[in-house]
Image (tube, grey):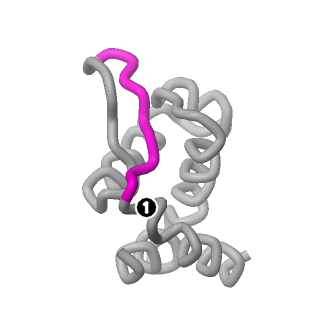
Amino acid sequence: MEKALWYLLAGTRGGENRARLIHALDERPRNANQLAEELDLDYNTVRHHLDVLEDHDVVEAGGGEYGKLYFLTDRFDYHREEFERITDSID
């Protein structure tokens, strides 16, 4: 997971937005539309980043297809300190 977080946050252009998504989901679960509004991002951009984060087991979806909520995974919670170190180093 540590390597995946470095790649997702520091190794790609979308890292800053992915970190913002993670911080928002840490506050409370949200759906893609709520995240787009909260972070002032295009809905399709949010969907793309959520898909990438889901593929790397950082977030998981709950509920039905329409309006499903996204949550941080237990695996991410286990590596939260590494996430904080990475975001501190790229700020």
User: Which amino acid lies under the numbered mark 1 shown in the image of this protein?
Assistant: Phe
Residue 18 vertical placement versus 60 (above, below)? below
Position of residue 58 measured from the top left corner of the image (x, y, whole percent): 39, 57
Please report the bounds of the magenta region as a residue range.
Answer: 66-74
Answer few, some or many: residues within 10 Å of disc 1's Cα (few below 14, many 20 plus, some between 14 and 19): some
Mark 1 falls on what kind of element?
A: helix
* On-image quarter of the N terminus: bottom left
Position of residue 9 measured from the top left corner of the image (x, y, whole percent): 51, 71
Seen at 31% across and 57% down, the residue is 57
Residue 18 vertical placement versus 69 (above, below)? below
What residue is shown with label 1?
76
Residue 81 picture quarter: bottom right
67 left or right, relative to 64: right
Q: Nearer the viewer, residue 38 or 24?
A: 24
Q: Nearer the viewer, residue 74 or 47?
A: 74
Q: Is residue 55 magenta?
A: no
Residue 20 vertical placement versus 34 (above, below)? below
Position of residue 90 measured from the top left corner of the image (x, y, whole percent): 67, 79
Seen at 47% across and 27% down, the residue is 31
Residue 36 picture quarter: top right
Residue 89 picture quarter: bottom right
Question: Count the marks: how many?
Answer: 1
Seen at 57% across and 55% down, the residue is 17
44 left or right, relative to 40: left
61 left or right, relative to 16: left
Seen at 54% across and 67% down, the residue is 80
* On-image quarter of the C terminus: bottom right
